[in-house]
Image (spheres, rainbow, N blue to C red):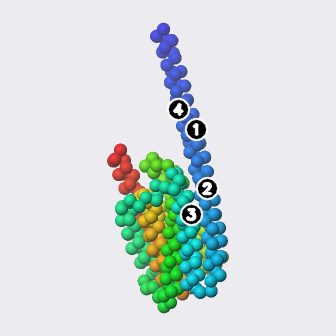
Amino acid sequence: MDGSIALLLPRLLESKLAVARFSLKATMVNSKNTLLRNCWIGLAITILFIAATVLMSVPASRFTDPAAREYAAGIARIIIGLITILAMRRPKWGSYALSWRAPRGWAIILPVAAYSLVVYPLLFTGTLGLNLSQPNVAAGVAFNGFAAGALEELVFRGLILSLLLGGNLDDQSPSNVRRAVIISALLFSVPHALNVFVGHAEVRVLAQLVWAFLLGIVFACLRISGRSVWPVAVLHGVVNAFVHVNRLGVEVQPSLLKAAALAFAPLPLCVYGAILLRKQRFARTQDR
């Protein structure tokens, strides 16, 4: 009797190992399928974002007054933003990112704000001054710029990043977080390629694709570490508003050297964002 049990034990162990391997493979396949599906959904949302922005800018383009045109475009973006917020209210589509109770989220954006509000105006125009020669136009440009930045955060760091992360942020592995950050940043850079059709120089658009991708990584790290999309939305909106008024009336045609400087200016901020995520992972590990 003991001999038969001894013979059965290895077979039982082998069968359990086989079941465990099968279960692990099934989990990995399911995870890959979910990621692929969410990537396609993210791409579809990006295309819808581009289409909605273009379509809703048509009524704004009918205004002959530059200030009115800017205000109309900003209002159109606010409408799209409200629609995005409604979509995010679903549990797995970013409802947790809409929380306002994230004091750390507001604190960690300050170094990024200080860096961006100094470096980018200097790279674009060589000055930190604002063009206020036409106050109404400047106000409209600032309003539209703020709305554009906030909307992009709601779409790419609110909706798409939340979709790629899925479920509870605390349950995510570092590799899943990295994938979500990179994919959302790539999708964020895509709409900036359309600037070539509105007269921007090719070298500027190429630089913008790079800096949009890098800033997308930074903003995603801030959103994840701060656990709210609102601080990042305000940050992006304020930087947009300031930089747009700073370069108002200035035709930006950067040289190759300046384009490279613009493109890679966010690299120090990427290091800062990586440090934030690392600290968050360490704190979560300690809590467990």
Q: Earlier in the sequence, mark 2 or mark 4?
A: 4
Which numbered circle lies on residue 26? 1
Query: Which of the two marks, 1 or 2, is nearer to us in this view?
Result: 2
Given this view, does label 3 or label 2 mark the residue nearer the observer?
3
> Could you tell me how far apart the alpha carbons at marks 3 and 2 are, in whole angstroms?
17 Å
| Residue at position x 46%, y 59% in the image | 98
Report whether residue 179 is seen: no
Q: CA distance from mark 2 to mark 4?
A: 31 Å
**Image-quadrant location for residue 129:** bottom left
Q: In the rendered view, tell whether residue 109 sits above or below residue 165.
A: below
Q: Identify residue for label 3.
A: 83
Q: Which residue is mark 2?
A: 41
Identity, as a three-letter code, of the amino acid under mark 2: Ile
Q: Is residue 159 above or below residue 146?
A: above
Nearer to us: label 1 or label 3: 3
Residue in the foreground of this view, choosing between 191 and 99: 99
Figure check: 193 above or below 177: below
Q: Which mark is residue 20?
A: 4
Q: Kindly report which numbered mark, 2 or 4, lies closer to the viewer in this rendering.
A: 2
- Pointer 1 with pointer 4, Cβ within 8 A: no
Rounded to the nearest angstrom, the CA distance separating label 1 from label 2 is 22 Å
Q: Is 167 drawn above or below residue 25 in the view shown?
A: below
Q: Amino acid at mark 1?
A: Ala
- N-terminal-most mark, 3 or 2: 2
Spatial CA distance of label 1 from label 4 is: 10 Å
Badge 2, how many Cα within 10 Å: few under 14, some, many 20+?
some
Task: Evaluate if marks 2 and 4 touch, with contact meaning CB atoms under 8 Å apart.
Answer: no
Q: Residue at x 53, y 77 (%)?
A: 144
Of label 1 and label 4, which has the lower sequence position? 4
